[in-house]
Amino acid sequence: MVKLAINVDHVATLRQARGIDEPDPVLAAGICELAGAAGIVVHLREDRRHIQDRDVILLRQTVKTKLNLEMGAAEEIINIALNLKPDMVTLVPEKRAELTTEGGLDVIGQQQHLARVIAQMKEAGIPVSLFINPDAAQIKAAKKVGATFVEIHTGRYSDATSDEEQEREFAMIVAAVNAAHGAGLRINAGHGLNYRNTARIAALDKIEELSIGHAVMARAIYVGLDQAVREMLDLCC
């Protein structure tokens, strides 16, 4: 059974919209864990548009399962991660103008920098995942720079507007999962997954964990966070 990690960034987004102290992503993370989530994911962006330093400090102290810190490979955030020591970090591309992460890392184009960051994290005992598109060349580069995990970007599969397009994207994910497994990498997946398209990805037995946020938080508005997490867990069985 694939594990389910819940991204609580959007709880912080709602809080920041009013500039007050609720809803609290730290409290939300606890509810997600009680509902059965196997991990909590947060993205500490350079512009602090949602998750704040206070959040990651408290989450490190309170998360009982696994804390996965998504981050760009910028020096300020690297130093925070090295001090915080999350259970793992996931390196992602980051643009200030984007609404959400757009596509995977270009590992091929920044191998030297990523290898240095990964070495720093490994020295601190922090495993590193690279968020990449389902592309064999990027997987090969991820292995070369020393990543422990890759997180396969499922956004194009999730955003497909026809059955044919979704089938093509699904086939690319399957191929990428097999290539990563063959390279000795551990495999997670995520981005854009929802209650309609998750089951097929969850059924790929080489994937260890799915990272899902927006769909669960949107569902929680109607049914509550506990039930929204449990419903998603049912799809991962």
Image (spheres, helix red, strand yellow):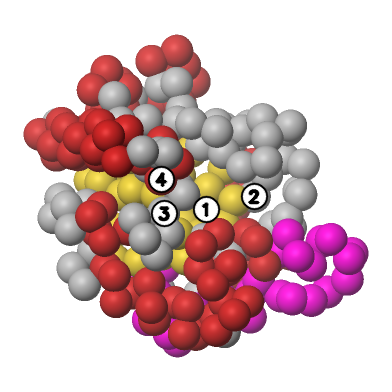
- Write down the residue under mark 3: 193
| Mark 1 vs 3, N-terminal side | 1
Q: Which SS class for mark 4?
A: helix
On screen, residue 133 versus residue 12, left or right, reads: left
- Write down the residue under mark 2: 44
Residue 76, image quadrant: top right
| Mark 3 vs 4, N-terminal side | 4
- Quarter of the figure that contains the C terminus: bottom left
Disc 4 crowd, CA 10 A, few/some/many (<14, 14-19, 20+): some
| Mark 1 vs 2, N-terminal side | 2
Tell me if residue 182 can be seen: yes
Q: Which residues are magenta?
A: 12-39
What distance separates the C-alpha of mark 1 from that of mark 3? 19 Å
- Write down the residue under mark 4: 158
Disc 2 crowd, CA 10 A, few/some/many (<14, 14-19, 20+): many
| Mark 4 vs 1, N-terminal side | 1
